[in-house]
Amino acid sequence: MIYVCGMVWQRENRDWLDGMMMADEDKIGGTGHRETARVTSALLSGFGPPLSRLVHSMGLVIVLIAGPANAEYINPSEIYVVDGDTIRMDGDSWRLVGLDTPETYEPRCDYELALGQAATARLRGLVASGRGVEIIRLPGRDRFDRGLARLFIGGENIADILIREGLARPYDGGRRLGWCG
């Protein structure tokens, strides 16, 4: 589970309450980030309401800069890149969240195929780069029964890399835009 610290001002008691926002089910185990959030929350609890936004922002930054929570280090040879946003490992297919890459299986035009092949090649290159490969397995499955995950190479989310390089678009579910003009 990824825990992010939050502070809630309780008007009746004129006091700060320790709050946490929980994202992603804890499938790996461990409470390191839960404790980080509690400690961060406790350290910041002395600030009053005028600083509430600053305190809340500082709490989020402190926890988020710690890097991928509950990430597993993976041997790159255990990962097979299917396309720019799908991998296979541990006998299962995994949809990498946070991005959408062009289709290579049933592309709608030559441009989509070419860009999809480039995204696939780039992801394969990143996985084979020798930099640390980490994965965070998320709860749930997509409509194709793939597990959901975030993949990090050298501590950086591959979604950010491929989007920055123009090989993917940000995606958080729902209807996707086409790649053909």
Image: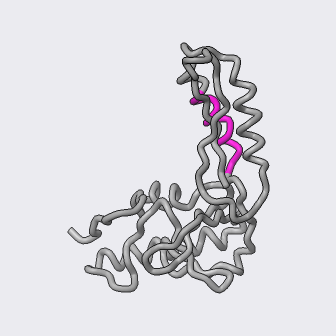
Task: Pinpoint residue 37: horizontal percent, then vertical percent.
Answer: 71, 39
- Considering only vertical position in the picture, is 45 above or below 180? above
- Considering only vertical position in the picture, is 140 above or below 47? below
- Considering only vertical position in the picture, is 61 above or below 88? above
**At 61% across and 24% down in the image, what residue appears?**
55
Give the quarter of the image for residue 93. Answer: bottom right
**At 40% across and 75% down in the image, what residue appears?**
116
The magenta segment: 56-67
* Any part of residue 81 in sight: yes
Q: Magenta stretch: residue 62 in it?
A: yes
- Considering only vertical position in the picture, is 73 above or below 144? above
Residue farthest to the left, as pictured: 181
Q: Nearer the viewer, residue 144 or 134?
A: 144
Q: Magenta stretch: residue 71 in it?
A: no
Task: Pinpoint residue 167: horizontal percent, then vertical percent.
Answer: 42, 65
Task: Pinpoint residue 78: horizontal percent, then vertical percent.
Answer: 70, 80
Quadrant showing the N terminus: bottom right
Instruction: Please name the colour scheme applied to the rendered image.
Output: one colour
Q: Nearer the viewer, residue 87 or 69?
A: 69
Task: Pinpoint residue 168: horizontal percent, then vertical percent.
Answer: 42, 63
